[in-house]
Image (cartoon, rainbow, N blue to C red):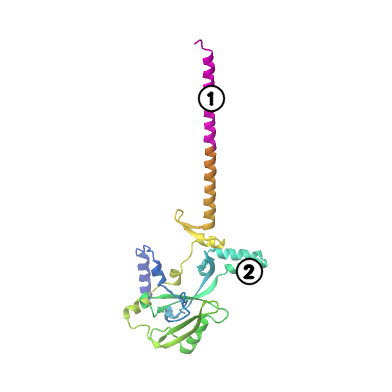
Amino acid sequence: MSSLDAILSQYEKNTQNTKSTKISNEDRLKKYFTEKLQKGVKNATRRFRILPGKDGTSPFTEAYFYERLVNGKYEKIYCNHLNDGEYCPLNEAKEALLMEGSKKAKQMASEYTARKYYVVKGIDRDNEDHGVKFWRFKHKYTGDGVMDKLMPLFKLKGDITDAREGRDIIITTNRNEKGWSIVTSIMCDDVSMLTEDSTKANEWFNNEETYKDVYSKKSKEYLEIVAKNMTPIWDSEQSKYVAEEEKEENETASLEEEITFMREESKITTSNNVITTNSDEVETTSLEDDGDDLPF
């Protein structure tokens, strides 16, 4: 693509009516490739073709995500600070703990530290109709991660991402003694074309999505709640995330206020009834006394 084509394409893209369309969970899941085993499966083999990077760049993008326990499940949360240089409540919490300086604070700070991941685009050979998928895996400083298993293939076989003379990779996953999914080996298949279907080739090569389109950012409110070790839930009335614990506390306080108000109202009503009753008795007595003075 020439510079002129790029300029015209950019202008066309930015002047189109880009009305956002909500992606269903099913369609979103189709964008993810994972080596993780499904529940009840002890081992599996997957075939994947890594797409080449644009203009000779590496196809592997480095990205940072937090690993946080949210509502009983571990979530990988996009780090605004390290990925985009923006404000991130989780990073702020980490910096505050490190400044505090105690041993306990430093240990807690590690829970607020984003981890390095690699993200690469490719084709799941078992689901080519899903189109381009994104494979995310953690950088392992111990030297036994997915990237560490891929590098020998590049060194021995050359550029395995090449569209004409590249190779599919075969990923074998097993469970370890803790039951976690572990990639135990990655091998290369024979040399092959990415695809002989020109329609698929154009679709895959012209896919301009990045990992930021797939692994979306969380809102400021969501991140602030997680940073407080609370549970974020969507509040449709406020159209934002709120802390479940604080919402329950507010609802309880509101209920207690309502009960107190009702009790006070009840006291006032009872008091008024007593005053009215006493007044009636006084009037009755007064009439009876007057009656005694009558001549008939």
| Residue 277 included in the magenta stretch of the image | yes
Vertical position of residue 51 compared to residue 216: above or below: below
Residue count near mark 2 (Cα–Cα under 10 Å), binned few <14, some 14–19, many ≥20 = few
Q: Which residue is mark 1?
A: 281
User: Residue 279: in sight, yes or no?
Assistant: yes
- Quadrant, the N terminus: bottom left
Magenta region, residue range: 267-296
Return the disc, 1 or 2, that comes first in the chain's sequence: 2
Q: Say whether residue 178 is left or right of residue 106.
A: left
Q: Say whether residue 51 is left or right of residue 145.
A: left
Residue 252 or 200: which is nearer the viewer? 252
| Distance (Cα) linking label 1 and label 2 | 76 Å
Tag 1, which secondary structure? helix
Task: Give the image quarter of residue 133.
Answer: bottom left
Q: Which mark is residue 107?
A: 2
Residue 11 or 227: which is nearer the viewer? 227
Vertical position of residue 149 compared to residue 23: above or below: below
Marks 1 & 2, CB-CB < 8 Å contact: no
Which residue type does callout 1 highlight? Glu
